[in-house]
Structure formats: C-alpha cells, structure tokens
Image: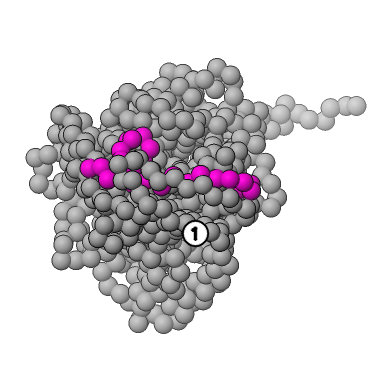
Amino acid sequence: MKNNFKPTTYSFLILCCLIALSSCSSKEKKVEVIKEEKPNVILILVDDQGYGDIAALGNPYIKTPHIDALHDTSARFTDYHVNPTCAPTRAALLTGHNANRAGVWHTVNGRSILLEHETTAAEIMKDNGYATGIFGKWHLGDNYPSRPQDKGFEEVLVLGGGGIEQTMDYWDNDYFNDTYHHNGKLEKFEGFCTDIWFDEAMKFMADNKAKNKPFFCYLPTNAAHSPYFVDDKYSDPYKDNENIPNAAFYGLIANVDENIGKLTEYLNTSGLMDNTILIFMTDNGTSAGAQIPKTDNLLDGFVTKGFNAGMRGIKASKYEGGHRVPLFIHWKDGGITVGKDIDALTAHYDVLPTLIDLCDLEVKQDIKFDGQSLKPLLNGDDSNFKDRIVITNSQRIDVPEFWRRTSLMQGKWRVVDGTELYDLKTDPEQRTNIADQYPEKMAEFRAAYDTWWADLLPGYSVLPRIYVGDKAENPTTLYCHDWHTEKAASPWHQRHIREGFIDNGYWLLKVSESGAYTLKLRRYPEETHLALNAEAPIRPALEGTSVRASKKGKALNIEKARIKIQDKEEVKDVDASQEYVEFTIDLEPGKTNLQTWFTLDNKEELGAYYVSVEKL
C-alpha cells in the first residue's frame, strides 16, 4: 500500500507527541499503586504530642529537626482529626471504624478493649503476605482475644496497658532498662523505652528485607505520655524557658525526633526508603505542651502558656485542641516526596482504607469502613470530601449520654455538645458560640448526629470480654484497670495499688471450657512476690533523669476474701502474710462476670487488684 503521509506530516505528529509528553511531565505526579512489588508500611503514632508540639507547625520553642524534615517532604493533612484520648484513637486507626463501633470509647473501665470481631490493619496486611510487627504501646486489651498477637501482629514488643507505671505495666518500670511483653513472654531490655522500640523495629525491617518480604511496622510510642521520665540531656535545653510548661515533655519529644532521624537514615542507607509508605501522626491533643489556667476548665480552656497552634483545649477536650493532630505521609515510589498541604476534613479511620488502596490489598467483602481512602486527595481530587461530616467524641461513661463530649465537624463548622456552634474561618480559637444565629444549620447538624448515633447505638450491647481457660492464654491475669465500675476511672495506676485505693468492680469474662479453675487473688502483681499486707518498697529516683521516686506502699490488714462468679460465691479467711488467697471452683462454658472482695480489719472493702485465673 502506498504511503500517503508526507515528511511534514510526520514532523507535525512528533511535535504533538512532544507537547503532550511535556504537558504530562509538568503536572503533579499522581500516586500510583505498584502491583509488582508491594510497598512496605511504617506507621508512627506518637503519644500525647499535639499539633502544636512540632517546630515545622509553628512552635517557636521546640526543636524537631527530623520531624520537620519529614514534614517538608510529605503530604500534610492540616485538618486531620482523631479521638481526644489514647485508646479510642488506636481502635479507629487500626480498624477503619469509629472507635465507638469498635467498642473502645474509654481508656480504662474495661472499655479500652477492642471487640473480638473487629478486623485490624495487621490482620489484613498479614492476609496479603505482609510481615507484621508492633513496637511500643498497644492499649487495646492485655488479654486474649484482644492482644496484638491475637489481632494479626506476628512480632510483638509492647508495654502493658496505656503507659509506663500503669496497672498492667511491669511493676516499677520507669522507662529505663524495663521489662516488656515480647511475643507473649516477659523480657527485660537494656536502654530507654523509645530507643528500644525503634531499634527493635529496625531489626524487624532488616530481617524482612533479607527475606524479600514486605512488612507492616506499627510504631506506637508511649512517649510523650506521662509520667514524663527522660534523660536530662533531652530536657535540659528547655528548663530555663519560662514559656515552656513542661521541659521533660519536650525532652520526650526530642528523643522521639532523634529516633525518627535514625529511622530515616536507616531507610535511606538500606534502600528501603523508596518503596516504603512512611506515616507520622499523633493520638490526641497535647498533654503538656500547652497550659490552661487553673481557674478555667483544664481541658476546654484557653492557652496562657506554651504553644497550641492557636487552638482551644488540650488532650481529652471536645474542642479543636483535643483532637486535631498532624498527619504526614511520605512515599517516594508513589510520588509523595514534595511538601504539600491538604486541607480537606479527614480522620483517623481514613488511614486503613488509604493503605488498602495504596498497597492494592484484598479485603473480605463483609468488611465495611466508616472512613474513606485519602488517595483521591493525594491526587488533588477533594470532590468526595467537601460535604463530609466527621464526628469524634470521648464518652467515657458506661451508658453514653446524648451529645456528651462530642465534636461534629463539616468543613470549618464545629458543633460542640450539640449546643455550641463555631466557624473556624473567622473564629479558630472557638471563642464565640454562634448557634443562635444559625438555627437551620443546627437543625441539619442535629439530624446528622441522630442518624450517626442510631447507627452506632446497637453496638453498645456488644461487650468486650476476656477469655479464661482458653489454650491461647492460660493462666490469665486480670487487672483492676479493666474493672467495670461506677467510678469515673478504675484503679489504673500503680500508685493506686501502693496507696490501697478503695474501689471495686467486676470483670466481663467468657469461660472457654468447663472444668476446675484456680483463682488467685492478689494485692500486688505476681512479679513483686509481695505479701498481701506488705508495704511496697520505694522505687528510687534515677540520677541524671527526671525519674522521681515512688511513694512507699501502704499496709492493708486484709482479713477476708470473697469471690462471686456464675452462680457461685465463696468466702475465706486470709493469711495476709501470703502473696495471694486461692480459690478452686468448677466453671461452665459461657459468658459470666467475676467480682472479688478483700475485707479489711476496719470493715472497709475493696476488690483484688490482680487475679490469676487458671484452668487446671
């Protein structure tokens, strides 16, 4: 066939192609999924560091050079929200569900335990061929079936409960040379806790790099949570600045920043950085980077000292400072390497759907998310985010009250407790309630809240239970931290144990198998080998650090012990010079409650702080 195209025609076509290629290269590179080689995922979650506790986000006092460097090369979500406290945020982050739906809406009282039927990011990643590891703070249950190893994590190195010195934590841990749970066993590690989390995480990464296996590494630090123990070399630079409320708090963040620097250096030198999705975020507003006057509500007042990025409220607050936090995402092979602010309203339960999208993961069809993938925003498309409503709350009571401690958000509108309305465009500090000026808008938001609440309410009848007598964990140690009690908070800290805090509650259990069980009721945890009436010795201060001495334990003259479980109730006289009181009882399979009592010589009663339940 005769060729009818002339040379000038070819030249024109080539020119058109060059123009088209030039046009494509000038546009922002879109995030694409690499299907041939799955990207690694590192999810860093810093505890209690607020949006304003980062130099790159405007803090004039703190130095965070490595977090700043990550900020400068990441997609930054500037209107990103979590729950106002630790455990609820972790539940939503790992499940893609509202924390209330996942069963976690408190940090204690048995409501920091993830519901058994929830599927986590680790389980999804593991099912898709990823190695999974957690290093740091879990705070979603310390017993089967809600431990990290029960929820998809293969390599597990965690402290107990929600922080050092808490009831589940190994007795007298103080951040330095402590004992942690490593793959189901207690193991002592040398060094500072945050250094250990990052060092062990990098070993996990190196091991899976050698195996040519993609990994999901979850790095939830317990820093910068109280008790604010850190080496003086990190806090000293901040001690003489009268504008800084808590130098040790900044010191903890400085150490986290140093470890992020070590991690990014490792990723670069090992060749892992290019195809690793690196995510940095925090779990709630600042706990000690901003000070509220004592005459104001501690959580909801206005900052008079420190830096809070112009927001009202701190950790646990329903106002912006309680739940707006940083989120940075970096992924070189995915085209996310240039600092870019994304202002759309986003939330913690968006992270898992995003990872599923970016990593091209297969998910069971029955799993539905409350969140949505952020990939369109990474590619510049905010069409599905303009009118969305995000609701975050901190109910912290066993029978949730309508609107209590709730923030409903749409765009820059904020509805607080269903009675206050703020427009952040003109009032970023939420100082002026304008609800009476917008009655129709308030009616719309109330209708949205009603729909949201009606969807969640049935889930409150599903209660998290601890299994006993199961092959996965036998014996099982129960902690008073998980008591269901009428008080605002069960005894969650080791100082409560030392002082003999008078309280009681019950555990929600599920007996796996019928048979004979022993129940050992203790005042102190097993590792102390202390008698029931012992005065726990002082844990000394640590020179060169901010670790302070503990208080000496108070002697309790316990005369009787009682238990009630299923339809059985037994009482025993107590030899308080022993470590525990032991009961042997036959149990049947099924759901039940367990409550215990210690009766003192003055007739006061309290529950056994620790109970070991073992099927014989």
Residue at image position (46%, 69%) is 399
**Could you tell me the amino acid type at mark 1?**
Glu
- Identify the image quadrant of the N terminus: top right
Q: Is residue 531 magenta?
A: yes
The residue to which callout 1 is attached is: 569
- Residue farthest along the right direction in this orientation: 1
Q: Is residue 93 above or below residue 462?
A: above
Residue 127, image x, y percentages? 65, 36
Q: Residues within 10 Å of mark 1 (few under 14, many from 20)?
A: few
User: What's the magenta region?
Assistant: 511-535
> Looking at the rendering, which quadrant does residue 180 occupy?
top left
Task: Depth check: give the residue in front, 377 or 608.
Answer: 608
Q: Is residue 587 magenta?
A: no
Where is the C terminus found, in terms of image quarters?
Answer: top right
Q: Residue at x 39, y 80 (%)?
A: 438
Task: Give x and y (percent) for residue 291.
Answer: 19, 55
Q: Is residue 302 above or below residue 49?
A: below
Front residue of 237/316: it is 316
Residue drawn at x 30%, y 35% is 173
